[in-house]
Amino acid sequence: MQKLAISLFIVFFVVSASSSQTKLADFAPMAGCWERRDDAKKLLVSEQWMALEGTSLNGMGRTVKDGKTVDWEFMRIEQRADGIYFVAKPRANPGETDFKLISSSAAEFIFENKGHDFPKRVIYKPGEAKLTARIEGTIQGKPKSIDFPLTRVKCG
């Protein structure tokens, strides 16, 4: 039992340390325009992130199907006294939802809100020319994840 407690403490410490060492500046490479285009389905999924200023990186997402905007979302990654948060305000929700950064590395940022219905996790995997956004959680008791692979495009 004592070994389990020590192991759990070490895991908690490593996760806390990795996310607490993350700075808002680590998200700066996400700034810019990103999209996934599927001409066969007449679908365009895009995200645009403004340059980091102050205590937040602000963004918006949009889904266009058959030439019509079918969904949108306002987002921000912000520094607070108790950590870094991804805040989402999708079209379908009347309010914002906060997801706290729980783990990070150069290749991945994981935000979580265990109390939210779906998703419970928002994951960003940034790269020079690619950005993958992923949402995870459960729907009707079954694990569900959706990936949004995006490619950097010229803004405008």
Image (cartoon, grey):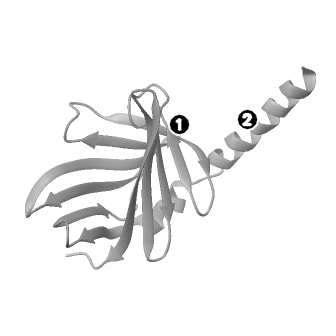
Number of marks present in the image shown: 2
Q: Position of residue 108 (x, y in %)?
A: 56, 57
SS of the residue under disc 2: helix
Amino acid type assigned to the residue bearing label 2 in the image: Phe
Q: Position of residue 27 (x, y in %)?
A: 49, 60
Q: Position of residue 92 (x, y in %)?
A: 20, 37
Q: Residue at x 29, y 61 (%)?
A: 47
Quick check: 61 left or right of 24? Answer: left
> In the figure, residue 17 lies in which quadrant?
top right
Quick check: 145 left or right of 110? Answer: left
> In the figure, residue 15 lies in which quadrant?
top right
> In the figure, residue 98 lies in which quadrant?
top left
Residue under label 2: 12
Q: Residue at x 27, y 40 (%)?
A: 89
Q: Earlier in the sequence, mark 1 or mark 2?
A: 2
Residue under label 1: 81
Q: Residues within 10 Å of mark 2 (few under 14, many from 20)?
A: few
Asked if the residue under mark 2 is in contact with the one under mark 1, i.e. CB atoms within 8 Å, the reply is no
As measured in the structure, the alpha-carbon distance from the residue carrying label 1 to the one carrying label 2 is: 19 Å
Quick check: 61 left or right of 28? Answer: left
Q: Position of residue 37 (x, y in %)?
A: 25, 70
